[in-house]
Image (cartoon, grey):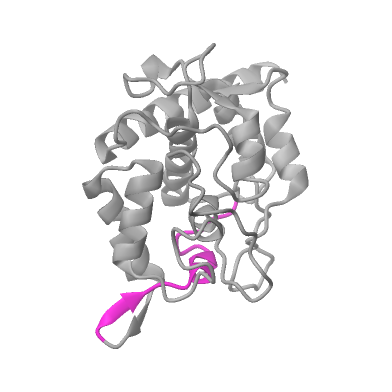
Amino acid sequence: MPVNDSHPYVPATPGDSRSPCPALNALANHGYLPRDGRNVTASQLITAIEQQYKLDAAFTQTLVYGGLAKCGHWDGLSCKLDLHDLAKHNVIEHDGSLVHDDTAPGETFAPTRVDPDLLHQLLDTSDSDFLTLHDLCQAQVTRQDASRPIGSVPAVVSKGELDLIYEVFGIVPGSKEASETATNGGKLVVPKSYLKQWLGQERLPDGWKGPVNAITLTSLVSHIHQIGGIEKEIKMTDKTDL
């Protein structure tokens, strides 16, 4: 959704709770979630995610209630979330993140600050001002090759995260508009300017209008399979080039 003047961007302060998830951090930095990132309710999460990132209701509820079940805490009869609790290592968070360092040995919580070098590595995957789906897959393969091995479940989660970047921020090439046909047959591109702001500053990007159609769990699963196929081809090509 376009950035709303009634929800200005205010960077997190040292006492605020933040997660390894730029999507939620950006919502808190704009005030769509509590700005301190603490005691966030299910209804606050659902409303903010549906309205700003345009995930459909069923998909949003699956993510929110799953996250609360794994990382939330009880406050009376209500289960709430401090965003930093999502940084618990290998609960939902995982090594091999596109723009976050791996969790240091023995640490309970993963880093929540974006690593500038990893962000530059992601953006440098392409020489143009945009990243294609193949570029994003190449960046993920490169990053995970340099990381500790991750299990099969985190591998699927990471592909889902990649797809959401693509579906939420992808636009039709040569246009500033999102596609009216889901991911336009895999031909969308993601402006680097969006990622510099969303990942680098954890803010909703200037000029971003959001997806045309609601993103569904069904589309996510389909695209996870597509991403898996692309990454498999990339790995096979890398082996033959050795």
Which image quarter holds the N terminus?
top left
Q: Which residue is drawn at the image coordinates 66% and 47% (left, top)?
A: 147
For residue 116, side relative to residue 129 (left or right)? right
Percent x, y of residue 72: 38, 73
Q: Which residue is drawn at the image coordinates 39% and 20% (left, top)?
A: 179
Percent x, y of residue 215: 31, 36
One can see residue 152 in this view: yes
Range of magenta residues: 77-95
For residue 190, side relative to residue 67 (left or right)? right
Q: Dividing the picture into quarters, in which one does residue 55 lie?
A: top left
| 94 in the magenta segment | yes
Q: Dividing the picture into quarters, in which one does residue 9 lie?
A: bottom right
For residue 94, side relative to residue 65 (left or right)? right
Q: Which residue is drawn at the image coordinates 69% and 43% (left, top)?
A: 146
Percent x, y of residue 183: 38, 22
Q: How many marks?
A: 0
For residue 82, side relative to residue 129 (left or right)? left
Q: Dividing the picture into quarters, in which one does residue 15 lie?
A: bottom right
State whether residue 168 is above or below residue 12.
above
